[in-house]
Amino acid sequence: MIALDADRLAVTEINRLLKEAVHGDQAVTILNPRSRHHLGVGVLGPLQLTIEGNAGYFCGCLCEGIKLHVRGSVGWYSVDNLMDGEVVVDHDAGSCIAPGMRGGVLVIRGNMGSRCGQVMKSGTIIVGGNSGFMTGFMMIGGTIVVAGDTGDLLGHYMVGGTIYTGGRVGSTGVDVQEVACTEEENVYLGRLLDHYGLARPPAWRKFVSAQKHHHY
């Protein structure tokens, strides 16, 4: 294992060393992150990375193939434009998480701020707790799974994709409709949460675009 101490290294140096470690046979751990911004940015290729604590804004952005585990929380705009890979955050996440996501899986075990998955194209976002307002704002594709409650304007102006929620919905956004979940979807969602050790809600609700407001 390669250990990088954020108390001794600048963020730019940490990210340079992460890029060098891609395709290597050693996992990397960042120690003492202390909510520093821009950790783990621009990693293109397979890399197993653990951040031992909280990370700040823009954590894990612009990555493809990364397997990132944050043993804490992350700040705003983290996991921006994830192309592929898996990101697991043990605690909470700020607002605007995973904008423009194009693939891979993001798991937030705790609660999520507002506008997660904004304009996401593909991939899967899983929230073990609650998610704030405008979850899935203008999403184009992909899947958002929120085991808890969601705030107002769920899926506001979504074009495509699917949002599942297991709790209360503050309100739905413009051009959003609720449809029935199939038994196959219920089984899939249960197994998905089991895989990440998250509690299953009593029932699921499914929301999609009504396809009435966008014209291309």
Image: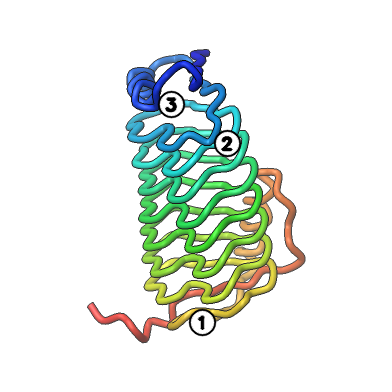
The one nearer the camera, 204 or 62, is 62
| Up-down relation of residue 18 to residue 135 (above or below) | above
Count neighbours of disc 3 (C-alpha within 10 A) and say few if under 14, some if 14 to 19, many if 20 or more: many
| Up-down relation of residue 177 to residue 43 (above or below) | below
| Up-down relation of residue 48 to residue 117 (above or below) | above
Which tag, 2 or 1, sits closer to the chain's start? Answer: 2
Q: Given this view, does label 3 or label 2 mark the residue nearer the observer?
A: 2
Count neighbours of disc 1 (C-alpha within 10 A) and say few if under 14, some if 14 to 19, many if 20 or more: some
In the picture, residue 167 is in which quadrant? bottom right
Q: Secondary structure at mark 1?
A: strand
Is residue 80 toward the left or the right of residue 201 in the image?
left
Distance, label 3 to label 2, CA atoms, is: 19 Å
**Does any portion of residue 23 appear in the rendered image?**
no
Q: Which residue is mark 1?
A: 177
Extreme right residue here? 202
The reply to whether dot 3 and dot 2 touch (C-beta < 8 Å) is: no
Residue type, numbered disc 3: Leu
Q: Can you tell which mark lies on residue 54?
A: 2
Q: Secondary structure at mark 3?
A: strand
Distance, label 3 to label 1, CA atoms, is: 39 Å
| Up-down relation of residue 172 to residue 75 (above or below) | below
Residue type, numbered disc 1: Gln
Q: Secondary structure at mark 2?
A: loop
Which tag, 3 or 1, sits closer to the chain's start? Answer: 3
Q: Position of residue 115 (x, y in %)?
A: 48, 63
